[in-house]
Image (cartoon, rainbow, N blue to C red):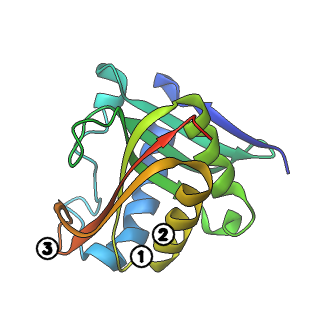
C-alpha cells in the first residue's frame, strides 16, 4: 500500500470538514458531545487552518484514497515550551491496524522536528495504546502526565498529556 501525507489545499476544505464530522461522531462516544441544531458537531478553529500561520492540515492517503487526516498547530494548551501541537488525528476504520496511523505520525514528526504537545482521552483505549507506542518508538525527552487537569475534555474528564521531542533519534 502506498501511503502519503498530503497538505490540504484551500479548495479541499470541505472534504476535510466532511471527514472531521465522521471523526467527531466517532469521538463522541468518549467525550459525550452532542451535535448542534444543524445536526453537526462543527469545529471552532477549522477556518484558522487557512487564515493563521502555524496551522497545518494534512490528508492521509492510502493508494491515492482518503484514509484520514492530521491537523497540527503551534498553539499550546499544556506545555508552553512545545513548538507543535498535534491537534487532531484520524484514521478511517478501514485503514486502522494496517500501519497507516503509524506512517502518518512518523511523517509529521519527521516533517516538523522539535518539541511536541499531544493529549488523548483516557476512554479512547485504541488511542491510548497507539500514542503510547508511537511516541515511545519515535521520540525522546518524553514527559507523560496522566489525569492532567490542563488537558480536560468537554465531558470534564482529564486527558493524558505528552511532551516529547522528535528529530533526535
Quick one: quadrant of the C terminus? top right
Label 3: element kind: loop
Q: Residue at x 70, y 70 (%)?
A: 97
Q: Decide if residue 2 is on the left or right side of residue 59.
A: right
Where does label 3 land, which residue?
156
Q: Upstream in the sequence, badge 1 or badge 3?
A: 1
Label 2: element kind: helix
Question: How packed is label 2: few (under 14 Cα within 10 Å), some, or many (20 or more)?
Answer: some
Q: Say which mark, if any, is on residue 96.
A: none
Rendered location of residue 4, percent (x, y): 72, 39
Rendered location of residue 42, percent (x, y): 28, 52
Q: Decide if residue 54 is on the left or right side of residue 69.
A: left
Where does label 1 land, which residue?
124
Q: Upstream in the sequence, badge 3 or badge 2?
A: 2
Question: How packed is label 3: few (under 14 Cα within 10 Å), some, or many (20 or more)?
Answer: few
Question: How packed is label 1: few (under 14 Cα within 10 Å), some, or many (20 or more)?
Answer: some
Rendered location of residue 81, percent (x, y): 26, 35
| Residue 91 is at least partly visible in this image | no
Q: Are marks 1 and 3 in contact (CB under 8 Å)?
A: no
Q: Nearer the viewer, residue 11 or 29?
A: 29
Q: Are marks 1 and 2 in contact (CB under 8 Å)?
A: yes
Q: Nearer the viewer, residue 169 or 17?
A: 169
Rendered location of residue 132, percent (x, y): 50, 66
Where does label 2 land, which residue?
127
Q: Residue at x 57, y 36 (%)?
A: 168
Q: Residue at x 60, y 62 (%)?
A: 92
Amino acid at each position: 500500500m502506498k501511503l502519503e501525507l498530503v497538505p490540504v489545499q484551500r479548495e479541499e476544505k470541505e472534504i476535510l470538514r466532511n471527514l472531521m464530522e465522521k471523526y467527531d461522531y466517532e469521538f463522541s462516544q468518549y467525550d459525550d458531545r452532542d451535535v448542534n441544531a444543524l445536526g453537526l458537531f462543527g469545529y471552532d478553529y477549522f477556518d484558522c487552518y487557512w487564515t493563521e500561520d502555524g496551522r497545518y492540515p494534512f490528508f492521509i492517503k492510502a493508494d491515492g484514497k482518503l484514509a484520514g487526516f492530521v491537523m497540527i498547530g503551534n498553539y499550546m494548551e499544556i506545555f508552553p515550551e512545545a513548538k507543535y501541537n498535534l491537534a487532531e488525528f484520524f484514521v478511517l476504520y478501514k485503514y486502522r491496524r494496517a500501519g497507516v496511523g503509524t506512517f502518518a505520525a512518523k511523517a509529521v514528526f519527521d516533517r516538523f522536528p522539535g518539541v511536541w504537545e499531544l493529549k488523548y482521552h483516557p476512554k479512547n483505549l485504541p488511542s491510548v495504546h497507539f500514542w503510547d507506542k508511537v511516541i515511545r518508538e519515535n521520540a525522546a525527552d518524553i514527559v507523560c502526565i496522566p489525569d492532567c487537569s490542563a488537558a480536560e475534555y468537554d465531558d470534564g474528564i482529564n486527558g493524558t498529556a505528552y511532551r516529547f521531542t522528535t528529530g533526535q533519534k
